[in-house]
């Protein structure tokens, strides 16, 4: 597969990503039954021992079987697997997250991007279209998406990464550099494979206007129990799980892949999305972007 993402390949991606929507409706029901039916005591997210392999596809489109298998197994891609995906960028523009639907609420969950994007949240153009698609599915119920995070500047990601490295080194002074990096990546993504710096990942929740539904823990609240942060973490009530499953459904039907270690994080186009979609090349790479008004 070519390292550069061509326009025709991008079109193929967009056509293919909607094909799995119908099967995901049934998948959501299965996931909800597995989690809620057992009192929300699902085990911690783990990488499955058997990793699904993509079927040959000359078009370079995401493999639906691989995507569904990774979702059923609640797969979180390891740093090693993400590094195995070639980095490419299709040159897609950055736009505000509500560009295609002003009913989407942009509500920055963290202050770390204020100097770069102000009070706005930016994403890739196709991601903005997909957010509008997801929001349209909520509108009939009187609900809407709240986007709390999108693009993150590489310098900001680097700060998080260095802090995580320092914390792990202090806790495990006898570990090798490789061990330190693997553990640090569990808490703050290695900038080499981080998704937010591509503009392809979003942290979202559902609200009525600017008031979020009860998800058990607030958007991007890393002070909460690590188990509650996980999509299927222990201690999540039936109502909270129902709200999480609604978020999961509208986002995956719009074409996003979930990140099960954080219920709010969804991805498209970055290296992790490519990895979990059976692709060997990303659509988006890191950007050093600053909003025009900043």
Image: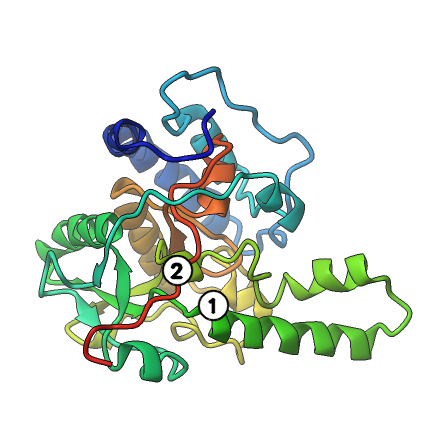
Q: Which residue is mark 1?
A: 154
Identified at 34% across, 84% down, the residue is 115
268 vs 222: above or below: above
Identified at 33% across, 67% down, the residue is 289
Disc 2: CA contacts within 10 A as few (<14), some (14-19) or many (>=20): some
Check whether the beta carbons of the residues at disc 2 and disc 1 lie within 8 A of each other.
Answer: yes
Q: Secondary structure at mark 1?
A: helix
Query: x, y percentage for residue 294?
Result: 24, 81
> In the image as oriented, which residue stretches furthest toward the right?
174
Can residue 167 be seen in this snapshot?
yes
Q: Secondary structure at mark 2?
A: loop
**Front in this rendered view, residue 34 or 178:** 178
Q: Which residue is mark 2?
A: 287
Q: How is the image coloured?
A: rainbow
Query: x, y percentage for residue 43?
Result: 63, 52
Q: CA distance from mark 2 to mark 1?
A: 7 Å
266 vs 203: above or below: above
Disc 1: CA contacts within 10 A as few (<14), some (14-19) or many (>=20): some
Query: x, y percentage for residue 149?
Result: 34, 69
Instruction: Choose the circle earlier in sequence order: 2 or 1.
Output: 1
Can residue 225 be seen in this snapshot?
no
Which label is found at residue 186? Answer: none
Identified at 34% across, 50% down, the residue is 248
237 vs 257: above or below: below
**Front in this rendered view, residue 138 or 119:** 119
Q: Is residue 168 left or right of residue 139?
A: right
Q: Quadrant of residue 53?
A: top right
Q: Quadrant of residue 29?
A: top left
244 vs 282: above or below: below
Query: x, y percentage for residue 168?
Result: 75, 73
């Amino acid at each position: 597969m070519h390292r550069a993402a061509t326009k025709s390949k991008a079109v193929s991606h967009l056509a293919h990503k909607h094909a799995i929507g119908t099967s995901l409706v049934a998948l959501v029901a299965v996931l909800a039954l597995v989690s809620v039916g057992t009192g929300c005591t699902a085990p911690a997210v783990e990488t499955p021992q058997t990793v699904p392999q993509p079927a040959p596809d000359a078009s370079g489109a995401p493999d639906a079987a691989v995507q569904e298998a990774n979702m059923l197994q609640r797969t979180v891609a390891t740093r090693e697997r993400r590094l195995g995906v070639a980095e490419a960028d299709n040159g897609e523009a950055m736009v505000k997250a509500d560009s295609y639907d002003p009913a989407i609420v942009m509500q920055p969950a963290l202050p770390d991007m204020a100097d770069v994007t102000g009070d706005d949240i930016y994403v890739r153009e196709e991601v903005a279209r997909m957010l509008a698609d997801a929001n349209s599915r909520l509108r009939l119920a009187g609900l809407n998406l709240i986007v709390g995070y999108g693009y993150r500047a590489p310098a900001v990601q680097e700060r998080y990464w260095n802090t995580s490295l320092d914390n792990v080194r202090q806790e495990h002074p006898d570990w090798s550099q490789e061990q330190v990096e693997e553990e640090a990546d569990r808490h703050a993504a290695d900038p080499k494979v981080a998704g937010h710096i591509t503009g392809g990942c979003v942290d979202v929740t559902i609200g009525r206007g600017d008031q979020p539904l009860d998800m058990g823990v607030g958007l991007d609240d890393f002070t909460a129990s690590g188990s509650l942060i996980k999509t299927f973490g222990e201690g999540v009530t039936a109502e909270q799980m129902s709200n999480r499953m609604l978020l999961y459904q509208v986002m995956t039907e719009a074409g996003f892949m979930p990140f099960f270690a954080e219920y709010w994080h969804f991805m498209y186009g970055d290296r992790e999305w490519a990895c979990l979609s059976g692709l060997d090349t990303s659509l988006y790479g890191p950007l050093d972007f600053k909003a025009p008004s900043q």
